[in-house]
Image (cartoon, grey):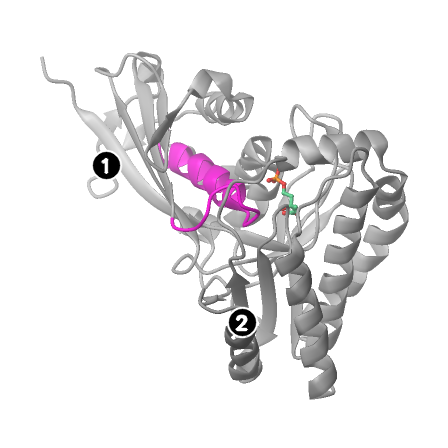
Amino acid sequence: MQQPVFSLTISSPTNIALIKYWGKRDAKINLPINSSVSVTLNQRDLRTVTTVSASRSFSRDRLWLNGEEEDVNASRRVLAVFREVRARAGDLRDPKTGQVLVRKDEWDGLRVWVVSENNFPTAAGLASSAAGYAALTFALSKLYGLPDSLADELSCIARMGSGSACRSLAGGFVAWDMGQRADGVDSRARQVADEAHWPELQVLVLVVSDTKKTVSSTAGMQTSVDTSPLLAHRAAAVVPGRLAEMEAAYQSRDFGKVAELMMRDSNQFHATCLDTYPPVFYMNDASRAIVRMVHALNEAAGETVCGYTFDAGPNAVLLTLKRHLPTVLAAANTHFPPKRPVEATLASESLLAALKS
Ligand code: PMV
């Protein structure tokens, strides 16, 4: 007999860290050695779209990322998200009629297929895993009928997929508190300022390279924890003060301060990569030319009109204000033709708010 297929599709935004997460104190459940903050980007610009489908006719869980099938059982991170969501499964109801489609105790007989697509380069240092694991967590939580009250737990589940993913479940300016506990229940994201707080902010992504990075962030940060004295110093003595300053500057919409802290933090993160042994290079010559361009632009303007940050890859994320956008775009288009910068705004919605509504 033909078995029904229960499907739903959601899309999730990426986020860009202004103060970076780098280094785990527990690699199994992604507990960080420092707290971090990020801004969530608008889903229109950079997003992952994920469809999850469950059916009795599926014999095993399967996952396709950008058209290529991945081995679900080979990914500890994917398995962790499945395991944690399934442990909390409720009834799946038809969103329109409220009719129960799959009862809580029937889930054991159903396997799930996941199809996920990014509209931006995967694994090229544009936080694709953040959008990807936020999407997977959110989509599975909807499929498995998790109650709305589990928003904080969802943050922890997304974190187990990819640390930075916990910050993609909320919009606006989001902090990921490192937490103190060994079980990680206090290591989760918290919205500091909502999506409406600073509409003047504008993001520009300069895609320097769309090839997959050679050292994954998981591998890079483990080697850094094991070998870099600068990383230990950064986590203990630099990041806590910087986070407090960043939060205050963002709350008071002090662009010059936010941009400076963001650039300093990106530079220090990449310095820890250089201090790692053997060193890890994520930025390249084009990335460094962008750094010089931004400083030259700010100097010429006599004020800070733009800031940069680089994740674990060579691509630049620039932060500016809408009124300075023409100046920054003109510089980027002069120095980096023919690739046009991707213009992105901050998220105008929050996945978790959607969950609660
Ligand atoms: O979440 P992961 O394991 O992909 O690590 C992300 C690390 C950085 O993007 C470099 C920094 C961050 O805070 O997002």
Does residue 147 appear in the picture of this structure?
no
Q: Residue at x 51, y 37 (%)?
A: 150
**256 in magenta:** no
Q: Residues within 10 Å of mark 2 (few under 14, many from 20)?
A: many
Q: What is the three-letter code of the residue carrying label 1? A: Asp
Q: Residue at x 76, y 50 (%)?
A: 269
Q: Position of residue 172 (x, y in %)?
A: 55, 61
**124 in magenta:** yes
Type of secondary structure dominating the magenta stretch:
helix
For the magenta stretch, what is the residue range?
A: 119-144
Q: Position of residue 75 (x, y in %)?
A: 51, 22
Q: Quadrant of ligand 1?
A: top right
**140 left or right, relative to 258:** left
Name the residue furthest left.
1
From the viewer's perspective, is residue 312 above or below residue 306? Answer: above
Label placed on residue 205: none
Q: Circle 1 sits on which residue?
A: 94
Quadrant of res 197: bottom right
Which SS class for mark 2? strand
Q: Residues within 10 Å of mark 1 (few under 14, many from 20)?
A: few
Q: Circle 2 sits on which residue?
A: 202
- Residue toward you, 92 or 219: 219
